[in-house]
């Protein structure tokens, strides 16, 4: 009986399988860096008798040498590095620092901002994060927050074309003279300021709460004041004019041998009705990078931590089926309904990443924990971006062909602090960085799984893109076998027949610009009317689930 059932299931899977679409590569767009204008701006720091074209390159070399003592490897950036910086003081102090050999701590060079613990420069540009105690700045002292707040700035040598419509942007009159064309907007939970200077796209971003003031929570109107102060003290701190590079991404080669067990639903085929208002997911076959799978060992199961297979259409509500947590095929959940705006999702709302369940616990400890714990590893060589107490761990990569951020969620922050998983640490691909856990604002705040997502720089800054096919290819490499792409289940087909909105989109119809305009406007209105209210961790209170 069991044998017959197994054969029947295998037959059903084989019937549902179809020719998988090949993965595609991301589309980087190079910037045209205008170093002559940057060098002309630096000329104010050169003595009049030295203000020749020959002296300006010498100045940038001298500035790089001085800045590198507090901003490591700054000369490797092909774009002018803009940070809140006292250039005159750094150049003035350089001879003294060279004589005594003591590197400065840099605090007094950053206009009231703390010296960055995270600064990464490379062929793709640079990224850095500054913190500030608002009480230390007289004009910001009324913003009463006990902990420092973080502000990020990036300069991009190239961006990615991800077919995303531009959000509504507003001019910034107070900064227009210094930064012509600067625009302000809120996108994916951050207030952002974007501008083009010396041919380089720059984006400043701050995490903030768009709504009524809350205790111990930075609201966006307060963040605006901090950003304006930041903009007023930006100066060129270094960088090096370089020959334009070929930014074509590297080829990603999939294993040719076929796995007898691993299968997956195609990208965008989220659980029926798990998207906002039943809108389906994003059909994105892009593998954004060749990465090491984020869990140390197989098997692993990419699926939903909220929605499970329906009970053959007998129930309209999600029904939890524990066996589906530890079984193939995988299921994309990038655009499952959550309280986050995600520009890449057809409905404008999504999950931001992919949930991954490790193998069953050999010895459950209770509270949804395992012994031994499942290890989480770095997917690439890169730099950690994470402040103490934060749940999110970013690994940032910056090379001639790739500029990306990989984010991990739900590991225990206290343990991450103890293990020095903090900004300023470099990691190697495959290096252990933590353990799968169930932390989300608190212990046992979610189910035992890893949330993993990918962000790439675009014309509107860092945005979430679907990590699904990137993970599929990484898992194939881990297990040494290519997966079989499966068409939608009978339940999904049944749901599609009853509601055409659930039908999977074709690859030519996945642009978010084609999402239903009325639905997009309705969501935008609901968000602005605070029907979607974020708590301090950024979760939507209206959509929160104990299993999220």
Image: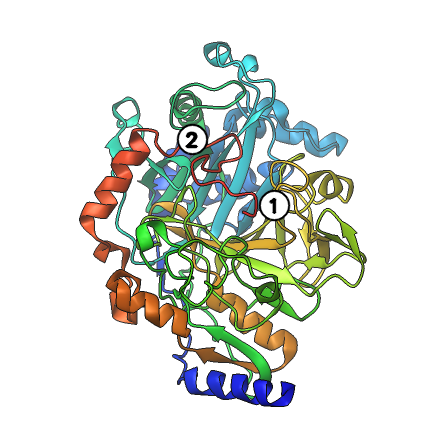
Q: Secondary structure at mark 2?
A: helix
Label 2 packing within 10 angstroms: few (<14), some (14-19), many (20+): few
How far is mark 2 from mark 1, CA to CA? 65 Å
Tell how many labels: 2
Q: Nearer the viewer, mark 2 or mark 1?
A: 1
Residue beneath disc 2: 49
User: In the figure, is residue 409 to the left or right of 349?
Assistant: right
Where is residue 135 drawn, in percent x and y?
A: 55, 13
Q: Residues within 10 Å of mark 1 (few under 14, many from 20)?
A: many
Q: Earlier in the sequence, mark 2 or mark 1?
A: 2
Say if 338 sits above or below 441 in the image: below
Give the labeled residue for mark 1. 446
Please state which of residues 35 and 175 is positioned toward the viewer in this rendering: 175
Residue 491 image position (x, y, % from top left): 40, 69
Q: Position of residue 137 (x, y in %)?
A: 52, 14
Horizontal placement of 319 versus 417: left or right?
A: left
Residue at left 59%, top 85%? Answer: 6
x, y percent for residue 455: 46, 53
Mark 1 and mark 2 in contact (Cβ < 8 Å)? no
Q: Residue at x 49, y 31 (%)?
A: 535
């Amino acid at each position: 009986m069991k044998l017959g059932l197994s054969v029947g299931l295998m037959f059903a899977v084989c019937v549902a399988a179809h020719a998988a679409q090949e993965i595609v590569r991301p589309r980087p767009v190079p910037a045209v860096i205008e170093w002559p204008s940057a060098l002309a701006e630096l000329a104010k720091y050169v003595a009049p008798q030295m203000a020749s074209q020959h002296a300006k390159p010498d100045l940038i070399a001298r500035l790089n040498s001085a800045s590198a003592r507090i901003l490591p490897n700054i000369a490797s950036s092909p774009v002018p590095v803009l940070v809140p910086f006292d250039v005159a003081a750094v150049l003035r102090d350089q001879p003294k620092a060279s004589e005594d050999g003591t590197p400065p701590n840099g605090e007094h060079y950053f206009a009231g901002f703390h010296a960055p613990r995270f600064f990464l420069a490379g062929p793709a540009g640079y990224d850095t994060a500054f913190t500030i105690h608002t009480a230390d700045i007289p004009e910001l002292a009324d913003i009463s927050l006990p902990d420092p707040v973080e502000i990020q700035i990036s300069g991009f040598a190239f961006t990615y074309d991800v077919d995303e419509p531009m959000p509504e942007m507003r001019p910034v009159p107070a900064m227009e003279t210094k930064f012509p064309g600067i625009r302000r907007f809120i996108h994916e939970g951050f207030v952002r300021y974007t501008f083009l200077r010396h041919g380089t796209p720059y984006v400043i971003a701050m995490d903030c709460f768009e709504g009524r003031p809350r205790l111990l929570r930075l609201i966006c109107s307060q963040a605006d004041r901090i950003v304006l102060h930041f903009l007023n003290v930006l100066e060129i701190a270094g960088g090096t004019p370089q020959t334009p590079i070929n930014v074509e991404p590297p080829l990603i080669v999939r294993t040719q041998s076929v796995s007898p067990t691993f299968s997956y639903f195609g990208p965008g085929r989220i659980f029926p009705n798990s998207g906002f208002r039943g809108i389906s997911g994003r059909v994105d076959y892009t593998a954004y990078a060749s990465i090491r799978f984020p869990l140390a060992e197989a098997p692993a199961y990419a699926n939903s931590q909220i929605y499970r297979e329906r009970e053959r259409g007998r129930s309209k509500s999600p029904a939890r089926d524990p066996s589906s947590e530890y079984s193939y095929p995988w299921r994309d959940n990038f655009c499952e309904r959550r309280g986050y705006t995600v520009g890449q999702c057809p409905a404008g709302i999504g999950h931001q990443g992919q949930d991954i369940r490790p193998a069953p616990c050999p010895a459950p400890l209770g509270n949804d924990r395992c012994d031994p714990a499942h290890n989480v590893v770095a997917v690439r060589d890169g730099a950690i971006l994470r402040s103490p107490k934060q749940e999110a761990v970013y690994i940032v990569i910056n090379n001639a062909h790739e500029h990306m951020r990989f984010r991990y969620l739900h590991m225990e922050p206290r343990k991450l602090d103890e293990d020095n998983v903090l900004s300023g640490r470099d990691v190697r691909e495959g290096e252990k960085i933590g353990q799968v856990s169930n932390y989300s604002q608190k212990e046992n705040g979610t189910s035992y799984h890893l949330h993993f997502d990918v962000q790439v720089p675009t014309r509107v800054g860092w945005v979430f893109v679907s990590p699904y096919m990137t993970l599929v290819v990484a898992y194939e490499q881990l297990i040494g076998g290519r997966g079989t792409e499966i068409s939608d289940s009978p339940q999904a087909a049944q749901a599609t027949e009853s509601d055409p909105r659930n039908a999977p989109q074709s690859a030519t119809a996945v642009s978010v610009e084609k999402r239903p305009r009325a639905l997009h406007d309705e969501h935008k209105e609901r968000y602005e009317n605070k029907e979607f209210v974020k708590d301090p961790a950024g979760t939507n209170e209206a959509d929160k689930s104990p299993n999220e």
